[in-house]
Image (cartoon, rainbow, N blue to C red):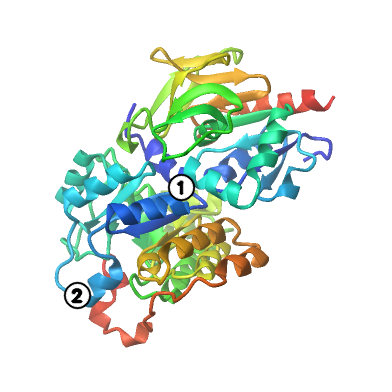
Amino acid sequence: MKGSFKVKAGLAQMLKGGVIMDVVTPEHARIAQEAGACSVMALERVPADIRKEGGVARMSDPALIRSIMEAVTIPVMAKVRIGHFVEAQILESMGIDYIDESEVLTPADEENHIDKHPFKVPFVCGCRDLGEALRRIAEGAAMIRTKGEAGTGNVVEAVRHARAVNAGIRKLQGMNHAELVHEAKQIGAPVDLLAECQRLGRLPVVNFAAGGIATPADAALMMQLGVDGVFVGSGIFKSEDPLKRAKAIVAATTYYDKPDVLAEVSAGLGKAMPGLEIPAIPKEELLAARGW
Amino acid sequence: MRNDAPLVGVLAMQGAFAEHQRALEASGARTRLVKDLEDLEGLDALVLPGGESTTMTMLMERVGLLEPLRDAISRGLPTLATCAGMIVLARDVTGGIEGQRGMGLLDIAVRRNGYGRQIDSFEADLEVAGLGGKTFPGVFIRSPLLESTGSAEVVATHEGRAVAVRQGSILALCFHPELTSDRRLHQELVRMAGVGRS
């Protein structure tokens, strides 16, 4: 049997403890693989450039995605617009390994996310808190990531979102069924998924950090906050020495609880990507506010 | 957990190591995540989990874990290897990145992602030799394809292809028992660990 939820969520389980890197060329993809990335996200522009250039951001050119799929042996992900199920059908037909229904692109539907259950290819979706994570899982997402604020090189929003998910799960401990029903209404998520989180003490699918991770210390910070792995978008190929930084972030994600290793891998990496202060971004340009 | 329960190390570079840890503890073992050289000390058995073999190998080389691990396994440390773990142990690896080589401890040739991309990942019930009773739920995720099994003993097949092999103290699987609630293969490793100690 192909395309079951178990194999969809299972691939995310194989990515745990790893780093998924944004790449815009086959050459980037090879560098990411050489550095130890467990997967790459194929796209035309990294979020920092999408942010700078503005305009409608869409699914990348299938020719580019295919060239990246051919360049590496690790799994390849690609982004579709929120609600744009046809972009998702196209990626599925190409045999992409994971689809990111992403707020980094311009939403195609302001009410509905994609119904992800009918797809044989798994989806990862962003969240800011437990309710949003569980709504996406209810729609069929097989992996969750924090939204963070992509393309800023500023980890503050990813921290906020990871802590919000943790707090949401902690709050469930000790609730009886009536209280779970009430909480489900409050956070807008199905009660059976809340009950599952309560039983497991964590999300029922793998949860990565994304949005603003730029240094090995950022990656280790997110791991210590309890995420299963990290996405690094603009942080690698917008930095001075991408291969060196990529290797360092991979090592930091494995040795996240060993400050001596973190000190060693953080040394002499050259300039990180320039960062952005969140309050300096006009409200309508905040990507994390897309999706609901 | 009893203090005299076998101690099983789970290689924790990257991949589904926490799932193995949970399955082993439910099977009566103590566990230790292996990230450094000193973590190999005093182990009764080892798990090489699924994940990305390129990532794991790169990290092991970087911290100098590859050779000591190879030594420990070649000296007979009971080892359960799943998916990427099987690739790490293999004699021949094809479909990998340039220069990717296995440890050469298992007399098999594997093709990475030999069953295709994620869209071809599948579940299938398997007859596993020696387990008896009901079939084992096989979960295959971007699985390697066993192209030849040399002197290794085939213990399970799927559609005529070997998907599990045993050679000496190594049990290697194309599929993921840690993603199921069937503990029989983890129990088998814990049994092998106990035999090695007595």
**Tag 2 or tag 1, which sits nearer the N-term?**
1
Question: Which secondary structure lies at badge 1?
Answer: helix
Q: Answer left or right for A138 relative to A250.
A: left
In the rendered image of this protein, does residue A150 appear above or below residue B160? below
Foreground: B27 or A68? A68
Q: Amino acid at mark 1?
A: Leu
Q: Answer left or right for A261 relative to B155.
A: right
Foreground: A95 or B76? B76
Q: Residues within 10 Å of mark 2 (few under 14, many from 20)?
A: few
Question: Which secondary structure lies at badge 2?
Answer: helix
Q: Answer left or right for A266 relative to A65.
A: right
Q: Can see residue B96?
A: yes
Circle 1 chain: A
Residue drawn 44% across and 49% down? Answer: A38
From the top left corner, tell me how far across and down residue A74 is, in percent. Answer: 39, 44
Residue located beneath label 2 in the image: A53
